[in-house]
Image: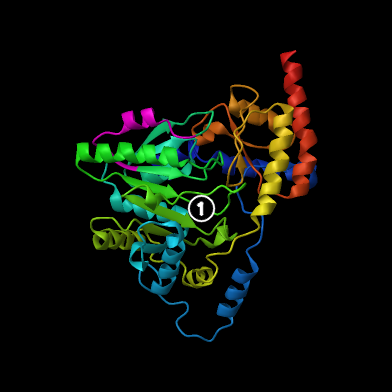
Amino acid sequence: MISKEIQENLKNASWIRRMFVEGSKLREQFGAENVYDYSIGNPYFEPPKSVVEKLRSLVNSDEKGTHRYMDNAGYKDVRQKVANAINRDIKNPISYEHVLMTVGAAGGINVVLRTILDAGDEVVIFAPYFAEYVFYIGNHNGVPKIIQTDASTFEPDLSAFESSINEKTRAVIINTPNNPTGVIYSEKTLNGLQAILLKKEETYGREIYVISDEPYKALVYDGHKVPNVHNYFKHSIMVNSYSKSLGLAGERIGYIAINGQFSDVDLFMSGLAFSNRTLGFVNAPALWQKVISDSLEESVDIGQYQERRDLLYRALTKMGFEMVEPQGAFYLFPKALESDDVKFVMEAKKFNILLVPGSGFGFPGYFRISYCVDLQMIERSIKAFEALVDYYKEKEA
């Protein structure tokens, strides 16, 4: 029998995967063309040509040692290229010594938490949040402390945040552009968070780390830019992956980049490398480190994602759905047509629409739409959404 902890966690497991499975059942019953699956954030577009060409050249190369172990932190030259890319908009440049290659952003966050947390340490997360954060924190004997955001903007409530910080607070996780809202935290918000953290660090006499989860940083629209967290927080830890920007979700390749202002960079990086090894990752995949190293400035076609956002956002707001227009990522987070978001999602399933309830992100009353899907499916789904709205209007009549 599996552990009691895992049994309990399974009861609260990801709604995203649950609805994805439901989609498979509906496709078998009604045919794929009649099911509108907005459940999972699985990148739709293939990797850029440069990525494919680099992979092909490496696979066909006679170079020795391509598949061997390297330093637990990753190849030095790759780490320097990552640092160079980060330095494009940074005040205090970093180098390879501040970068560790990881098995995706999820692996990176677990490595960071393993490195910094003592049992009982608290980690602040802002709702709505990526559901797995709670489990990642629990993996390392930490305690999640959930703070609600302002539903009109989905930016952190600074007053609530300040009240939440205490002597047990060890870290704050921010995710911008955000999953599930697509919101980019403003410079005003970041400055506000930093002012609070500086005061609290002085009060409690220890560092409070800001872990910035950035897999959607390259997916932004309408000229928006994502601020570089190292310019705002002294104890910032950037965690990123190439799952979305290069369409490599299944390859699990990313990095951790710490702020160069850390008081003991060598000790911190040694801790990260040790955690990377002893958590069983050992090192990021050798082949994929080399593949992405020459494609750091590349990206999938963001315009294609924006086209999908615009189509859905305009259609749904015209129907009466309330939502904040996303500035990045590939999600919409509208208000449900009834207070019980889980029930709403179940009702939508009757129209073959697969959604994820906001409760799965710690924010009841809303639901997530993942629009990294076929454009024609979106177009076909509009009538289904209209039928869903009409159904609710009839219920209210």
Q: Give the quarter of the figure containing the N terminus.
A: top left
Residue 235: image location, x then y, percent: 31, 49
Q: Residue at x 65, y 24 (%)?
A: 337
Q: Is residue 17 above or below residue 58?
A: above
Residue 169 in the image, given as x and y percentages of width and height: 29, 38
**Which residue sits furthest top?**
397
Element at badge 1?
loop
Can you tell which quarter of the image residue 78 is in?
bottom left
Asked whether residue 46 is in view, the answer is yes
Query: Which corner quadrant holds the C terminus?
Result: top right
Given residues 77 and 2, the one toward you in this image is 77
Left or right: 343, with 2 as reference point: right
Q: Quadrant of residue 83?
A: bottom left
Q: Is 120 colored magenta in this rendering?
A: no
- Estimate the x, y position of residue 194 in percent, counting from the top left: 34, 41
For label 1, the residue is 215
- Looking at the image, residue 194 lies above or below residue 358: below
Q: For this rendering, which residue is in front, 396 or 31?
A: 396
**Residue displayed at 50% across by 85% down:** 63
Residue drawn at 41 percent across, 50 percent down: 229
Instruction: Judge whether 384 appears above or below 305 on screen.
Output: above
Q: Residue at x 29, y 56 (%)?
A: 261
Q: Tell me if I can see residue 124 in this picture.
A: no
Q: Which residues are magenta?
A: 155-171
Viewer-proximal residue, 172 or 324? 324
Residue type at mark 1? Pro
Position of 132 with respect to 124 (left or right) is right
Is 290 in front, or is 103?
Answer: 290
- Find out whether residue 170 is within the magenta segment: yes
